[in-house]
Image: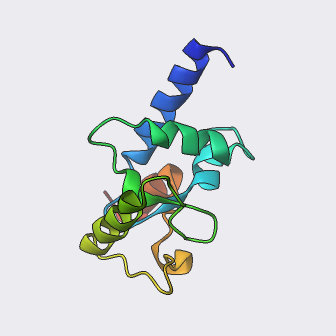
Amino acid sequence: MSELQQHAWQRRVWRLVVKIPKGRVATYGQIAAWLGWPRRARMVGLAMRHCPQGVPWQRVVNAQGGISPRAAVGSMLTQRILLEQEGVVLRSGRVPLVRYRWQGPKSESRSRRRHGG
């Protein structure tokens, strides 16, 4: 992947992450699949490492609902605090995905149609 393609990929990731509603999370793998790149969760992680201000990075978790380890331990604590401020309750250090997983951008538009929005 060229540097230009990598920057385009990062922007696509960030545009999708911005759509994750407050109080919901998505996994790195989900985001990769929604963007047409299944099995590229690590690329999503790389994009999230460089996300600009205003992107709700805290809403992206690993496949088990956990906060992925980082070099800066403080950012892991920050992610937990930000999620809790949005109403996400962690259990044993993980987000219960059954309750808080966002079903994606397509599920949101289907829901609006059903409810007349």
> Quadrant location of the C terminus?
bottom left
Q: Toward which corner of the image does residue 84 lie, by quadrant?
A: bottom left
Give whichever of 15, 4 is nearer the camera.
4
Query: Colour scheme used in the picture?
Result: rainbow
Direction from residue 33 to residue 115 in the image, left or right? left
Residue for point 39% across, 51% down: 57
Give whichever of 76, 18 is nearer the camera.
76
Looking at the image, residue 87 lies above or below residue 91: above
Question: Residue reaching furthest right?
Answer: 39
Where in the figure is residue 104, as x and y percent of width and height?
Answer: 51, 55
Residue for point 33% across, 35% down: 52
Residue for point 56% across, 13% down: 4
Residue for point 70% across, 38% down: 37
Q: Toward which corner of the image does residue 69 lie, by quadrant?
A: bottom right
Where in the figure is residue 3, as x and y percent of width and height?
Answer: 58, 15
Give whichever of 110, 48 is nearer the camera.
48
Looking at the image, residue 96 lies above or below residue 9: below
